[in-house]
Image: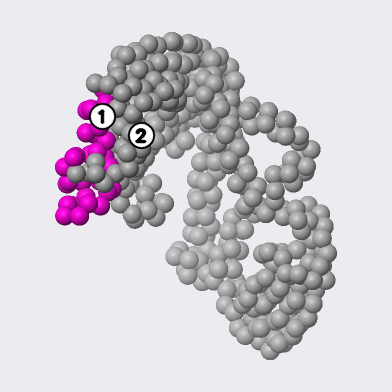
Amino acid sequence: MKSTSTKQKSSIEFKVTFEQEDFEPARLRALERLARRVKIPGFRKGRAPANVVEQYVDPNELADTMLDTMIRTNIPKLIADADIDPISIPHVDVMKHVPGDTAEIVIKIDIMPDVKLPDYRNMKVPFPEQKYAASDVDDVLNRIADSMSETKVVKRAAKAGDQVIIDFKGLKDGKAFEGGSAKDYPLALGSNMFIPGFEEGIIGHATGDKFDLKLTFPKDYGAKHLAGQKVTFEVLVKQVNEVKVPPIDDELAKKAGQKNLAALRKEIEQSISEQQAEANRRQYADALLNEIISKSKTTLPENLVNDQTLRLREEMEMQVQQNGASLDDYLAERKLTPEKYAAQLREMAERRVKGEIVLRKIADELAVKVTEAEVEQRLEQFLKQAHHDKELSEAERNQLMMRLRHDLRMDKTIAEIINFNLPKTKTKAARKRQ
């Protein structure tokens, strides 16, 4: 293998030539890889000798795997020899490939650029005040009471506060529209879960009543194809339930696991306080990072920004589709031209990339370390939260471990920045809690 390199401020480019003698060792490793997924009579997967495996694989697939093997094997060596710090997955372009004879490739790698940081230990960012009202506690108590309410089937017309079981079908221009129909749907009258007029239209109807509700969707409704549209809902009331909400007293508190109402209120206050403290910490961290990033100076790797822009575009379009709209609807609502939309995505991508580079630079300065035990613990938590019970392949596990290792290092770095900047008036207990 022969290679030359050209280094720039935030990237390095390798021009690599593989010659005939590089292909034979790559051929053997490629056949070992292919043997793991090729079924060969008389052999278990991965156990057949190379000369047998070669008879059962497509020559083009073998040639591609050989080249991929050579690239994968030599990239770490190129990085080590050049003594660089990659910050992204290498971009590989194949310029020429004659299987078994020669190959010319270009490898572009984004590297850690020079970064000029502000004094991130002494940022003048105020810490959010702890705010919650007595009414917040009352809201939680009301939700607890609602969760313990009892329902009783009644043979009368429905009224506000009741629960009804209904079938309904939404029609627009005489045709059913997506998401507008359901059967045996439990609806609390007064919950405002449906568009204006729907729940009000059910009040006064009893079990067995079948009727139409002619309504108009709000102009600002999320699904743009329904916003402001006139529709008809065919409704059948199948059951009316009277809801009895228990009083908020000591008896309710006992059912909720506390000895009396005062103890339950205290528990709720503590929970709200902890939630507010965590919200304040996140808000403070965001403000700190925004200030540090805006005051930092660096060169952004072009490939990294392009990749991030593409990722943001995919995320945005998926979100728009999930909300039942099209990208054209999204742009029209915000009065954005495709050019302005692209510029916004680019700006967001640059912000993300710059934030990543700045955080990584601070982590390097602070020599933030992550142990394998911490990564294993984070992996276990991730798989549990994701309800992932399928065994990971070695490649999947390594890739996930690499991402979690990076995320954990960034989390530790953010925690260090917060501790540097917490207001000096805070007590040690408050510092630890934040």
- The residue lying at 24 percent from left, 41 percent from top is 54
Which residue was labeled with disc 2?
64
What mark, if any, has residue 261 been given in the picture?
Answer: none
Taking depth in this image into account, of 58 and 365 the one nearest to the observer is: 58
Establish if 388 lies above or below 213.
above
Which residue of the protein is positioned furthest toward the bottom in this rendering?
155
Taking depth in this image into account, of 101 and 211 the one nearest to the observer is: 101
> Circle 1 — which element?
helix
Highlighted magenta segment, given as a residue range: 22-51
Which residue was labeled with disc 1?
26
Relative side of 149 to 7, left or right: right
- The residue lying at 36 percent from left, 22 percent from top is 103
Establish if 397 lies above or below 19.
below
Q: Quadrant of residue 102?
A: top left
Taking depth in this image into account, of 81 and 373 the one nearest to the observer is: 81
The answer to which of marks 1 and 2 sits earlier in the sequence is: 1
Q: Quadrant of the N terminus?
A: top left
C-alpha separation, residue under disc 1 versus residue under disc 2? 11 Å
> Circle 2 — which element?
helix
Establish if 246 lies above or below 366.
below
Relative side of 417 to 217, left or right: left
- The residue lying at 45 percent from left, 25 percent from top is 93
Establish if 319 lies above or below 202.
above
Give amino acid for label 1: Ala
Give amino acid for label 2: Asp
